[in-house]
Amino acid sequence: MKKPIVLLLSAIMAATLITGCGKKDTPKEDTTKNETGNEQTENTKNDGGKKTLTVTTWDNDTTPQFSATIKAFEDAHPDVKVEVIDTSADEYNNKLTVMLAAESKDPDVIWVKDMGSLLSMASKKQLLELDEFIAKDNVDLSVYSGAAEQLQVEGKSYSLPYRSDWYVLYYNKDLFDKAGVEYPSNDMTWAEYEELARKVTFGEGSDKVYGTHNHTWQALVTNWAVQDGKNTVVAKDYSYLKPYYEQAVRMQKDGIIQDYATLKTANIHYSSVFKNQQVAMMPMGTWFIGTMMQSQTSGETDFNWGFATIPHPEGVAAGSTVGALTPIAIGANTDVPDLAWEFVKFAASAENSKTLAENGILSGIQSEESFDIIASAEFFPSECKDALKYTNYVFDRPLDENIDEVRTVLDEEHDLIMIGEYTIDEGIKELQERVAEIKGY
């Protein structure tokens, strides 16, 4: 049973859901056979007769992770106009579910936010199989170092690796200097991280600087519990989560991190918290490197920042991290499959990996060259290049058929623990029982 405050939180969050979908302007249609033998309708727009391609993104205005690729593709294909269907990161999967259930022609191309939703969409036949396209164009999957095979569902390719991300620890150099505290190192345990966060918490009221920041994702607690590779978030026994929740609750109680309920009800984005210099540190994915570089390029921010490798549990090697792939796929109902494939192939190419690196983004193709490009880019904190490298990498969630259901339970129990409606033990007990019911344990 949900407590009244949880219902209130849910109602407020539900009110922010954006359910509108983008549509193509299709004044002219020419139905032909595409190269794989399927019928397609070639759409054109009135403005110069350009072909139209719709793509889904999240938080497109705050990061170049998608816009850089879209611009590069349009520059290389002047006869194509890419239309973006953008949603906030927190609501992306919900909106995509609604869109795909409608079985409309849009979207043509889908950036997949996590591998769990990839499995769900593939099982529902909402994605186009890519194997014929891959074979036709002799795409070498080995450049993805095994990642392309990890994305396969029952031996079939429904996507290509677009981006690879893992967690690092961002910090505000100016705030550390103001507090007279040394910057984070590339070898800190989570206990040392908490101690450091307490040292750089200072000020009062609206001028308060919090030592660090936990965004509202449950991953900002559960990730550290699976960092050693011994557990996953689909489990029979969730007792391994307890020390990490104890730390999060303790730091919240002591005012080292911001209040969870406030962040949740106000729908506060983590980027604004860091950009507004309200926090000295913040664990977040490598995608945020590009966001900060873009922010400084535009003049939105001008403070000094850097990042270190993510802290690690006691007994786990420094440089161990947690991450995920961002796949790119084609909607099964697209009316321009060949054009959509050209975009997907381009987005996941070695050529585009250099464009992404110039914008501080790590693609699905990793190389020393891409690290060098990123480190030499304007506004990249060049002394932090070594922090990009990791010694061990585990996925934040497994490719499990029930992962979306399990994640819903994880999110709900995370809410209850962090707002104090459940004790940690009560939350873990509920989590365990609910997941057991889903998995049939």
Image (cartoon, rainbow, N blue to C red):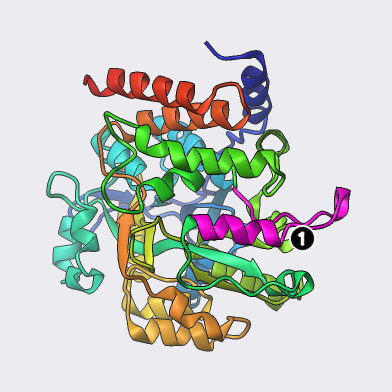
- Name the side, left or right, on which 172 lies relative to 124: right
Taking the spot 69% from the left edge, 63% from the top edge, the residue there is 280
What kind of residue is marked 1? Asn
Taking the spot 43% from the left edge, 34% from the top edge, the residue there is 97
User: Which quadrant is the C terminus positioned in?
Assistant: top left
Taking 385 as reference, is 196 above or below it? above
Across and down, in percent, residue 43 comes to: 44, 54
Residue 5: image quadrant is: top right
SS for callout 1? loop
- Name the side, left or right, on which 400 lies relative to 106: left
Across and down, in percent, residue 277 comes to: 75, 62
Across and down, in percent, residue 45 comes to: 54, 57
The magenta stretch spans which residues? 191-214
Q: Nearer the viewer, residue 413 or 248?
A: 248
Residue 113 visible in rendering: no
Taking the spot 58% from the left edge, 33% from the top edge, the residue there is 19
